Image (cartoon, grey):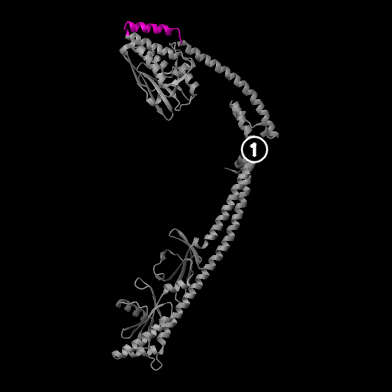
Amino acid sequence: MGLRAVFDTYRHMKIKNKLSILITMIIAVSLAFTIMIQQYVFSIYDGQIYDKSSRVLNLSSTAIETELKRLQQLSYRILAEEQVQDWLTSLKKNPSDYDRLIISQYLVDRLISYSGEEPYLFSIQIMDAKGNEHEGGNILRMDAERKRQIMNVAAEGNGENRWIYPDSKDSALIATREIRSFHRTNFDLDYLGTLVIRINIEKLVRDIAPEEGDVLIVSDEHVIFPSEPSFDLTRIAKPANAGKGYDIQNMNGEEYFIAQIQSLNTGWTYLNLTPFNQIFDRIIFIKEMVVFVFIGIFVVVILLGVRFSYSLTRPIDELMVRMKLAEKGNFEEANLFPSVGQVAMNEIGLLQRSFRFMIERINTLIQENYANRLLIKETEFKALQSQINPHFLYNTLESINWMAKVNRQDKISEMVEALAYLLRHSVDLKEPIITLGEEIDIVRSYVTIQKIRFEERLVFKLNVPEELMSRPIPKLTLQPLMENAIHYALESTIEPCEISIRGWSTEEGIFLAVDDTGPGFPKGMIERLRNGEVTTKGKGIGLLNIDDRMKLAFGEAYGIHVDESAEHGASVILHLPKGQEE
């Protein structure tokens, strides 16, 4: 759609729509500008929080590194102590069992004193040159394989400190190094033993690291802390903003703030993984609250603007609606204006009053004309019913019935009773609408008379559900259809003729069908009758009369039609409303 088309569409819009669009655009632009400023301010604030979190991790890692350096210096103090050097040298020279026991006890006491001074140590162990263990603190017994692993790692350091990371067998971080002889009298660097310091890394990190988030310490593929990480380290990417040492990544369907620092001393990587919402829940809440407040203000202002524009254009819209109703001929609803006291005395109000007076005069003339037409229609209908209104026959039929019973003429008596019932219900004009059950009783009386006349040639069947018997129907609707079936289907042949009445119900309404096995109707019979192209031979109530009475009773959507799809015979179907309303 081009700009010209948009302009033309706007030019032809209603005034209230133009006002609503204008107010909406002003509020939308103001809201967008405010949200942009708010997002910019919060982005600056978020960056400051990110930098602060990264600096906190830096301070924590520095504190941890400082503590580990101090423990490394402790290991140097132990191996450089003159007494420890003397004891280990003596143990290497194969002393007696007693001397070995005394020296071992001295060495253990010394290790216990060292371990007792340090809160982050599990134990301190020394394996002398003969492979004997001397330990102090919370000892964890090592098997031969573990002992060999530690000695190999210490040997690779050539006297320097080496780290052994926690595993499933031992949760301690182990600092190990070989003890060499460098006594002032003997500086030959002979191997005297291996020092093993087991550090409680869990306690150390928990005491120093920040409480928020999960701290991880890794070295290449080895996890130093915690012993059982809750994250897959392979899924943690390096921060995109490596210069600032933090990033936001999605793991396990949740966003995490990740601060990362690599130690220059040990080469370890320190990470702090914190759920994004845990740090920024208040900020997110404020952001969402501000957005919701702006949206609420936007909605309220839009509603007020729409209401304002509606109040300006509502009288014009109402007048247009009334004019359209009058154009369609619905003058009664077109005259449903508010009372005179509620109409504003401005230009629109005066126009409404003038239109109202005009509609009232037109509607009065229409109602008078319509009442006259209804009176004529009712007169025609009563005149039609009076065709079968021979009141004088009642007493005569009663006399004939009495004489037939006296002379034991049962057939005559049955025929007379059926005729009397038929006439009695035909002349009653008080109830033009009766139930389907009452109409079927009239049909049964008529069939009784015709069965005596045609005997086996007339085969009558009735298949109407019991739940439909209480439905309303215009009087003398099925009986005339039954009469037409006998006249056109039965009388024109000498063969037996089956006439049936069946009923069913669907979502569209209730249907009653009068079927016969006669020659059937020509196609388009109803339309040709309405157009006056053909005339009927009968003198009773015709199909058009039944159709008109049903439309008068229930509306234009209902009436009568002929099923032209039937291959043999005729099928006339009545369409009634499903509800009980008349």
**Residue 314 falls within the magenta-colored stretch:** no
Tag 1: Cα neighbours inside 10 Å, few (<14), some, or many (≥20)? some
Among the 4 quarters of the image, the one containing residue 288: bottom right
Quarter of the image for residue 320 reads top right
Secondary element at tag 1: helix
Q: Residue at x 36, y 73 (%)?
A: 170
Residue 336 percent coordinates (x, y): 61, 30
Residue at mark 1: 313
Residue 307 in view in this figure: yes
In the displayed structure, 478 sits above or below 20; it is: above
Relative to 457, say whether 509 is above or below.
Answer: below
Q: Which residues are magenta?
A: 389-409
Q: Is residue 402 magenta?
A: yes
Out of 426 and 269, give the one closest to the viewer. 426
User: Residue flagged by tag 1: what amino acid is it?
Assistant: Thr
- The one nearer the camera, 93 or 10, is 93
The percent coordinates of residue 450 (x first, y second) are 36, 12
Say whether residue 528 is visible.
no
